[in-house]
Image: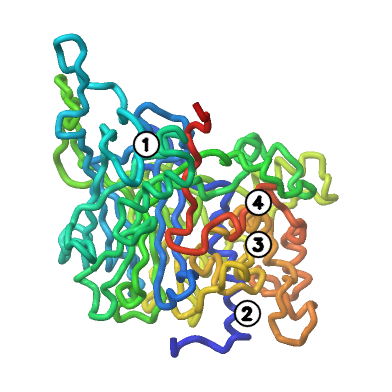
Amino acid sequence: MNNLVPARHYLAIAVPLLAGAIAAPVFASSHREAPYITQKPKVDATDFYLFNSYEPGRDGYVTLVANYVPLQDAYGGPNYFSMDPNALYEINVDNDGDAVGDVSFQFRFQQTLANGTGVALPIGDKMVGIPLEIAGGVSASSQAAANFGETYSLDVVLGDSRTGARSGAVDAISGETSFAKPLDFIGDKTFGGVQGYTDYVAALHNSGGAYNDITLNSCPSGAQDARVFVGQRTESFSVNLGQIFDLVNFNPTTIEDSENNNQLAGKNITTIALEVHQDCLTGSGNGVIGGWTAASEQQVRVLNPTASFDRPEIVAGAWTQVSRLGSPLVNEVVIGLDDKNLFNASQPADDGQFADYVTNPTLPALLNIIFNSNQEFGVADIAPQNFPRTDLVAAFLTGFAGVNQLATVTPSEMLRLNTGIAATAADAQSNLGVAAGDLAGFPNGRRPGDDVTDLALRVVMGALCHNIAVDLNGDNALDEADNLNVCGGETAADNEASAPAGAVAFRDGAPQNAAQFDTNFPYLRAPVSGSTASN
């Protein structure tokens, strides 16, 4: 991009951006983040990723990943984790900065029984339908034993997501507009192990891998080729979940990274993944985009007293948003409990109503109570005191000019990505992203391997008020010149004093890095098997 600032200056303003994107502090992915959404796991968005594709040979493409249906136990049969056929799932992109989507990718799901009525077996003199999703093994060569199936369609909407110009994605080979969603990984016996499941998934896609090559006719010429995958994957987020919400029941200054601390290990997620050329996303803007995922339901849902397989309820009315996710965990640990349902129903353009939660965040005060009840840090108050947090407002809600600020500035919560910054190869990524000098990482978008939890624990307690481990002025030294001066003090010493615990390396002990993921689309790995028995 021709509007990028020089690299040294870029780094100097990119690093404070870290404060913004996780000033809404992040301690877990967005599982069960609001009271109402706990009743609707099929439309509960858990994580959203937006990054320049780092698969070799995919320069110029952007990957967008939205995960839904939280905390899936791999053995959770017999009906497993289908999507809601009466819901609308969206990935929205703003490219001009008005906090309104300019491009919306909309997914609708359909459920089917084998042969329309399901597999039936001869029992005595009657044919009786079976109670399970499968009647035998399923493989790449034969899916005849599958009693249940899901398909989906994908529409691209330009302009208003409800009234804008709509165009359906098509299979790049067959021209079909309906795509198969693989069955969940029921178990090794059903699919013949991990490789058998991988081969089965590949057999459902025209690429011979875990995605379909599609054509998006509404995109500009030369940018219409895209990829899509929808299906079960291994949970992509690592977090010490139970301990975090039990008043941080560990010592965050001494705990070491261990997979034993990841309480989401062994669970799965349902992934909606797209890879789209950046020219389809950036429009006439400055190359920076903002993104978020959302799920909506129709306003009226009436239970069907004579429920059938495909009509357990009757739905009608306008689409109403019930789930929303951009930057990780704003709603879960930043928005007040009384406003969580409202946040899920709101649009980024209306985020001014939630400003107090950013300018005067309560989480640092809660951490102060938890960590400093006995003044173990030697000070009376370890929470940062530079109120209002105008530095976080600028970074978190607006982006920075020349870095990740959209063409027009409308304060709003979304994940922002500068498509002009080259992706970092998987083996060279830092899981601390921009804070460690990896400018292609969080909070410039978010990759699966970015450890937003550790970053958040440090930043919320004032890490950016202290000198940081990045040579901002290029003098080959880490010194007072490497204080960002974003915390309102007249000197570096004033900034440090406003955040007494800002230099502490807080962590949650759950590892998160690029090595936990594949290096090609859709990046998230095959799901955990529901059963590893060999009989």
Instruction: Name the secondary structure under disc 2.
Output: helix
Q: Describe the colour scheme in one phrase.
A: rainbow
Q: Is residue 488 left or right of residue 185?
A: right
Q: Earlier in the sequence, mark 1 or mark 2?
A: 2
User: Mark 2, mark 3: which one is toward the viewer?
Assistant: 2
Q: Earlier in the sequence, mark 4 or mark 2?
A: 2
Classify the position of the N terminus by image quarter. Answer: bottom left
C-alpha span from label 1 to label 2: 45 Å
Residue 264 x/y as whole percent: 56, 41
**Pick the front one: 386 or 248:** 248
Q: Is residue 383 visible?
A: yes
Q: Residue at x 36, y 75 (%)?
A: 278
Number of numbered discs overlaid on the protein picture: 4
Q: Is residue 86 above or below residue 129?
A: below
Q: Amino acid at mark 1?
A: Phe
Could you tell me residue 213's position as x and y percent?
30, 64
- Residue 10 lies in quadrant: bottom right
Q: Residues at badges 1 and 3 in contact (C-beta under 8 Å)?
A: no
Closer to the chain start, of discs 2 and 3, is 2
Q: Is residue 337 visible?
A: no
Marks 1 and 3, the one that precedes in the sequence: 1
- Circle 2 packing at 10 Å, graded few (<14), some (14-19), many (20+), is some
Horizontal and vertical percent position of residue 225: 29, 71
How far from the left and from the top, in percent, is residue 146?
A: 28, 35
Tag of residue 386: 3
The earlier-in-sequence mark between 3 and 4 is 3
State the separation of the CA atoms marked 1 and 4: 26 Å
Q: Which callout, 1 or 2, points to the residue nearer the camera? A: 1
Q: Which residue is mark 4?
A: 511
